[in-house]
Image: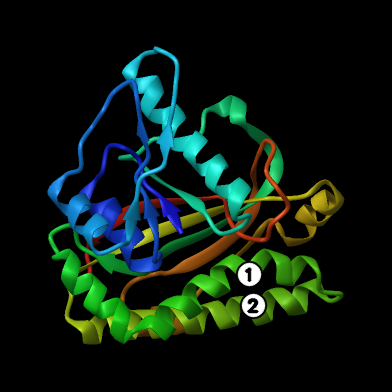
Amino acid sequence: MNIKSLLLDPQDLRTSLLFWDKLDYPSQNVATIGLQPEAKYLSDVGILQRTLVTLPLMNPGDAIRIAHTTAFRQLEEKEPGKWSVASSANSVTFADDELIAKRGLLVRLFGAIPVPDKDVPLNEILEFKEKRHAELVSLRHHLEAIYSRIASADDKPLAECSEFEALDVAIRDHTRVSIEGGLKQKLSDISANLSVSNAAVASIAAVAGYSQGLPIVNALLAGLAASISVDVGVSLKGAKDTSNPFRYITSYHKWLF
């Protein structure tokens, strides 16, 4: 499940729609913004919901950001580990004082994930998801499970090798079905921020500082260089202990196919 900013960006919307089955488009009482046509369509088909956040009078820009992050905390309280925040250069996210430096993990995929271009009709993405649900779920599962599986393993180097090989295969499968699906695609970088519990802080060092290429994906996308890295990142203040990322940050490259 994924939370979108009040300022919907067509490219971000399609990326979130590809990977998550439920989106939240928070509303608040300070700067009311109605549903854009694409958001209304997703609301009509039951994918997009709106969490209402009541705020005191403030600057509209602050209201948009606070509604965005407050909605996440409300949803996370109800369903721990099931929601994350979508973030990019085109969206708002947590303020610095809501984050704790060097208390989390940052898993970054560079040039590895094809996502639908901003002009692809939403109904075509939904049709693609229905046909290729297994590959999409597998990719998301491997990305979300990397930290918990490696951190809990007795032999961490072996676990790293095994988990990254499995992720490479999952990305390969997603890329292959994306090519077969015929949707216009862009290549993306996706970073996942994971909060780490107090008891597991010491394990960050054991999995951080890792970087490698993704040979199966690179062979499929000839001439491109996909890779993964794991490093120390930020943690979210007050976050419950879950193994799922609280934030995904996406950036985009040129058209892929």
Does the image show residue 93? Answer: no
- Which type of secondary structure does the marked residue at label 1 adopt? helix
Q: Is residue 184 left or right of residue 47?
A: left
Residue 80: quarter of image: bottom right
Q: Residue at x 34, y 24 (%)?
A: 29
Residue 224 coordinates in the image, percent (x, y): 34, 71
Residue 180: quarter of image: bottom left
- Kindly identify which residue carries mark 2: 163
Q: Is residue 41 left or right of residue 222?
A: left
Q: Residue at x 73, y 61 (%)?
A: 207
Residue 78 coordinates in the image, percent (x, y): 60, 50
Amino acid type for the residue under numbered disc 2? Glu
Q: Residue at x 56, y 41 (%)?
A: 73
N-term-proximal mark, 2 vs 1: 1
- Kindly identify which residue carries mark 1: 145
Given residues 188 and 47, the one toward you in this image is 47
Q: Is residue 17 above or below residue 87?
A: below
Amino acid type for the residue under numbered disc 1? Ala
Given residues 173 and 5, the one toward you in this image is 5
